[in-house]
Image (tube, rainbow, N blue to C red):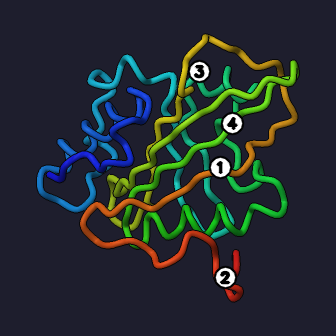
Amino acid sequence: MISMPSALQDAPEACRILFNHWNEIRAGALVPRRAQIDPARLITILPQIQIVEVQSRSVIHCKLVGTGLRDLFGFDYTGRNFLEMAPVDGRRTRSYRTTLAVQQPCATIFGGTVPFRSGARAPVCGVSLPLLPDQAGGNPLIVAAIALVADRGWINEPRDGTIGMPEDFAFLDIGAGIPDRNDPPDDWQMD
């Protein structure tokens, strides 16, 4: 086990709960398997959880999206390609960051604001952690907790299906180091 990274110590409770559970279940391994996640231990934060499957550099499939994220972003993106929900100019960056998080492997912490139709902007913070597939030859996954920094119970109105890029982003070392850059090099290609 590793200590909670200092970057997470002031993060929303959902982020800290997910990190502690993930860190505990890996039991000395670098990355735990997906089946080791115990939903009963995460019951209080399930609405803030998402799980994506990294199928390729161009396809990152949203396997599970909590109801709190649906309410926060204004739409349910279960089953969608996570890359296609980024603004066009952010897709390479999202592909790079997500792919490297499972290849390296490493965690990420990110934050920004979510816009509401009223003009308000709600600050959010998230942590993502790699998971191994349960079966040999399966695709790697990432589990994330995303939460409002100050939860006011806001529910967004239905939106266009875009999730913007985080304003703040960092890779976190879980024992295998971190990539030397946060943004893709010029030669980074999606499939």
Mark 2 belongs to which amino acid?
Answer: Trp
Q: Residues within 10 Å of mark 1 (few under 14, many from 20)?
A: some
Secondary structure state at the residue bearing disc 1:
loop
Q: Which residue: 52% across, 53% down? A: 53
Q: Quarter of the image holding residue 66?
A: top right
Left or right position of 49 against 121: left
Q: Amino acid at mark 3?
A: Thr
**If you read the primary sequence from the N terminus, does the residue marked by circle 4 or circle 3 appear first?**
3
Q: Which mark is residue 67?
A: 3
Asked if marks 2 and 1 touch (Cβ < 8 Å), the reply is no
Percent across and percent down for residue 188 are 66, 82
Q: Is residue 114 above or below residue 133?
A: above
Of labels 3 and 2, earlier in sequence is: 3
Cα separation between marks 2 and 4: 27 Å
Labelled disc at residue 113: 4
**From mark 2 to mark 1, how far is it between C-alphas?**
20 Å
Q: Which mark is residue 62?
A: none
Residue annotated with mark 1: 166
Q: Secondary structure at mark 3?
A: helix
| Between discs 3 and 1, the one toward the N terminus | 3
Q: Label 2: which residue?
A: 188
